[in-house]
Image (spheres, grey):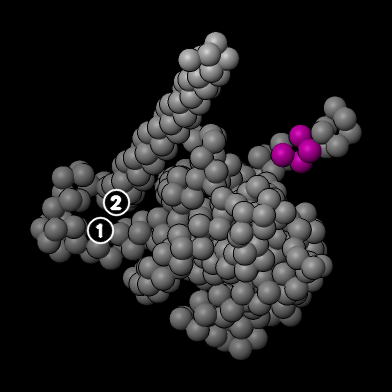
Amino acid sequence: MSRASVVTKNATHADDERLADAVRQVSAVRGRGLRRSVLVGAALLAAVVVMFGVSLSFGDMVMPIGKVVATLFGGGDGGSQFVVLELRLPRALLAVLVGLGFGLSGAVFQTVLRNPLASPDLIGISAGASAVAVTAALLFQVSGLALSASALTGSLVAGAVIYLLAWRQGVAGQRLVLIGIGVGMGLSSIVWYVMARSEVTDAQEAFRWLAGSLNGRSWSQVWPMLIALGLLVPLTVLAAHALRPLQLGDDAAAGLGAKVESGRLALLLCATALAGVATAAAGPVGFVAFVAAPIARRLVPGRGAALPQAALTGALIVLVGDFAAQHALPSVQLPVGVVTSIIGAPYLLLLLARANRVGSGG
């Protein structure tokens, strides 16, 4: 064998070794990321379960967790069964479901549009649900399941209008966000106009709903929400296969063979419906969709949209917020939206300040 052949063979062997080493390093990094993702998801799920148990235990009548568990499985006396099964359980379950819906919706919006401001409560989706629901309730005396359906319809119509207005041979995230903010402001003005034309007592009821509240919620709100999420979550998981290429940008995604616009439309439709059903169940609970996804992404950096973690983070935020709303002030039950807004508003100001510094070259 000639010396040149030996040199070429050694060089090829060295290249193979370097390639194998690079593959091992990438696999190790991916493995660590996956383990962290699973651990964070398990920790968030455990926190949700613990907070769920705390919500069932504490109230005007404090109950040991053992008695709560026994009551859930058919034990306990009539009083504990009424308190746990009829008063606290539906409220806690609805808090989890609403948080899951808002958290998942916000994560999809922000990832698809690649904009941290792309949240349903900022770009007009929740405002659409509010406008139609308040109009239906105050002008046409709609209530119950029909009111929830009107809120869902409003969110879908608002989403469709924003999408069509933002369309210019495709949809750019920044343009959709700006148009959504404008549409949301217009819809909010409709809400306040309708409330100004209504009776004071009716307007007060509408205002409590607009604050985002779980007060007085029962099984009649839980079952529709559970059925809706049972349909929408699997659809979102299926549509989420388009998320990874979309995160690379439209041109790169199209180069990889992804159907960019149809994939984006399917994801936005799922996210809009998730925000709509959550708003229908509890009102426009502010800032949950806005902050859940960034928190989840910080907990699992490098894992893309982190949809399961964002959904669990949303559930935990609403559970903790509702618990604080019930017990922070003696003899007063605040709307959960007040508490979540206290959490989310400073984050929004921080985000805007940071964007301003970047924009000014600071």
Q: Of residues 60 and 20, which is closer to you in this image? A: 20
Query: What is the quadrant of residue 285 in the picture?
Result: bottom right
Tag 1: amino acid: Val
Locate the C terminus and report the quarter of the image it occupies: top right
Report if residue 98 is visible in the image: no
Q: Of residues 235 and 312, which is closer to you in this image? A: 235
Residue ranking furthest to the bottom: 140
**Magenta stretch secondary structure, dominant:** helix
Q: Of residues 154 and 6, which is closer to you in this image? A: 6
Residue 197 locus on image (x, y percent): 74, 80
201 above or below 310? below
Tag 2: amino acid: Leu
* Residue 70 belongs to magenta span: no
Task: Identify the residue under disc 1.
Answer: 84
Residue at left 72%, top 78%? 194
Contact between labelled residues 1 and 2, with CB atoms less than 8 Å apart? yes
- Tag 1: Cα neighbours inside 10 Å, few (<14), some, or many (≥20)? many
46 above or below 331? above
Task: Identify the residue under disc 2.
Answer: 56
